[in-house]
Amino acid sequence: MKWFAEMEFWFALIKVLAIVTFLVVGTVFLGSGQPLDGNTTGFHLITDNGGFFPHGLLPALVLIQGVVFAFASIEMVGTAAGECKDPQTMVPKAINSVIWRIGLFYVGSVVLLVMLLPWSAYQAGQSPFVTFFSKLGVPYIGSIMNIVVLTAALSSLNSGLY
């Protein structure tokens, strides 16, 4: 049981590094004003190509299931308290930081994705992060992101065993 926190640290580090890399590269690319895949980047991509909900509200409602699933194990913050040296101080800090992490990593990456490429550039069978980095010409990005996804799966399994 004492290895849970150590394993989660390394699993989380890989996931966070992947998202932070995307956020930094995407923000720099967005700030440079260079076109990507023949499209000018920016806020206009959110409203172009059919605007908000180009296929109606139903697909957005269906996707809410996936969003809820992504944050279903948030209680692990409390579970990990058993391994904290000072849980009365650390757990409230961890819980309060969750909303900022959601805002930065989840909402921030989604907003950045839609400002970099039109929604029609993303395909159902490929990660949007892979799509973005592929358009930049990053080699082996599919394999790299598969490692990140496997790390996320191991993190989920680790939490389930704990």
Image (cartoon, rainbow, N blue to C red):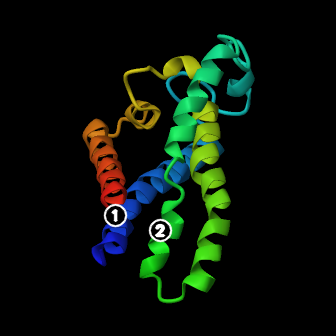
Q: Disc 1 or 2, which lies upstream in sequence?
A: 2
The residue shown at (53%, 68%) is 78
Q: Secondary structure at mark 1?
A: loop
Q: Is residue 129 left or right of residue 78?
A: left
Camera sees residue 35: no
Q: Secondary structure at mark 2?
A: helix
Q: Position of residue 8 (x, y in %)?
A: 36, 65
The part of the image, by quadrant, that contains residue 55 is top right
Q: Amino acid at mark 2?
A: Thr
Image quadrant where one finds the N terminus: bottom left
Q: Height in image: 9 above or below 42?
A: below
Q: Position of residue 127 (x, y in %)?
A: 41, 32
The part of the image, by quadrant, that contains residue 160 is bottom left
Q: Camera-side residue: 160 or 142? A: 160
Image quadrant where one finds the C terminus: bottom left
Q: CA distance from mark 1 to mark 2?
A: 9 Å
The residue shown at (49%, 23%) is 122
Q: Quick check: marks 1 and 2 in contact, CB under 8 Å?
A: yes
Q: Which residue is mark 2?
A: 79
Query: Is disc 2 surrounded by few (<14), some (14 to 19) or many (20+) residues within 10 Å?
Result: few
Q: Amino acid at mark 1?
A: Tyr
